[in-house]
Image: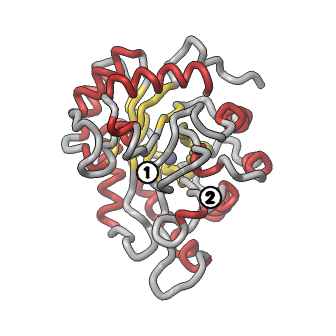
Amino acid sequence: MAMRDFSQDTNALSLNTATLGHNVDGHGAGWTCEQVIDACAERGYGGIVFWQREVTDPVALGLRTRAAGLRVDGLCRTPYLTGRDAGSDDAIKHAIDTAAGLGAPVVTIVTGGTDPGHKGVMESQKRLCDRLAWAVDYAATHDINLALEPLNPMFGGNRTCLFTTADALAICDAINHHRLGVAIDVYHVWWDTTLAASLASAKGRIFGFHLCDWLENTTDMLLDRGMMGDGVADVKGIRRLVENMGYSGPCEVEIFSSRHWWTRPPDEVLDIVKTRFCQVC
Ligand code: ZN
């Protein structure tokens, strides 16, 4: 199957507002959501993914986004479902309610880490399944998909109990609900030489694709992501794998970069994202 040609077409390009530092207090230029929407619309982006923390009135923000000609492509993210910092059932419902208000099709899930009192991840994965079972039912009543995002193994401990695409798909198999799938993020999967084999069973279950790059000399595992083309990840190769499994949705640019991209003027960052999207993604 032929890959989509992005060289002249930015409709699939979606901005995750974390690329402008909106996911962490005290970072970025402090643009309002309205400024972000207008700047993306001017440049021909197709959509935006907001973070829960910046959404105060989801319905109004969804309307405002669509009025500018953009999609709301998703919401980041639910509270953790496992680990020391796991969120309450109500907090998880609140994230799904927010997505529904926005008119977002999908909420991303970063699972959370190892539960207190346990070692390893297997017990935590069982608890994850228990919590997902009702969360996905709740999401389904709001026509929302849930996307499990496996994280690079270095995020084990406090942030995730899913390290690989195979891990995430195994949870999807266990729950077996059409509203539960996976999000594939270049930062988290670029190293995985089993990715192609794992994705072979992912048809219809990929609900998100996240773009960035892995810098050759990463200095901060959380906040030093690279711009597409600046690192060593095979961005286009990963997109090919995802699209071979039928994925035709948005490509969400998500670059946490406290010392570089978050310090540059957002207008400049958005221009460069668009150029790189067309040239190297
Ligand atoms: Zn991601």
Decide: is 164 above or below 49: below
Q: Are marks 2 and 1 in contact (CB under 8 Å)?
A: no
Circle 1: residue type: Leu
49 left or right of 192? left
Of the two numbered discs 2 and 1 in the rendering, the one whose residue sits closer to the viewer: 1
* Residue hosting label 2: 168
Dot 2 lies on which element?
helix
Per the model, the C-alpha gap separating discs 2 and 1 is 23 Å
In which image quadrant can residue 17 be found? top left
**x then y, percent, for residue 46:** 44, 22
In which image quadrant can residue 28 be found? top left
Dot 1 lies on which element?
loop
**Alpha-carbon neighbours of circle 2 within 10 Å: few (<14), some, or many (≥20)?**
many
Looking at the image, which residue sits at the far bottom?
A: 117
Decide: is 240 above or below 130: above
- Look at the image and tell me whether residue 19 can be seen: yes
Q: Quadrant of the N terminus?
A: top right
Rendered residue at 65%/41% (across/down): 233
**x then y, percent, for residue 183:** 56, 47
Q: How many marks?
A: 2
Rendered residue at 46%/70% (across/down): 158
* Residue hosting label 1: 223
Nearest to N terminus: mark 2 or mark 1: 2
Rendered residue at 59%/51% (across/down): 188
**x then y, percent, for residue 80:** 41, 64
Q: Nearer the viewer, residue 99 or 250?
A: 250
224 left or right of 169? left
Decide: is 132 above or below 178: below
**x then y, percent, for residue 161:** 56, 68
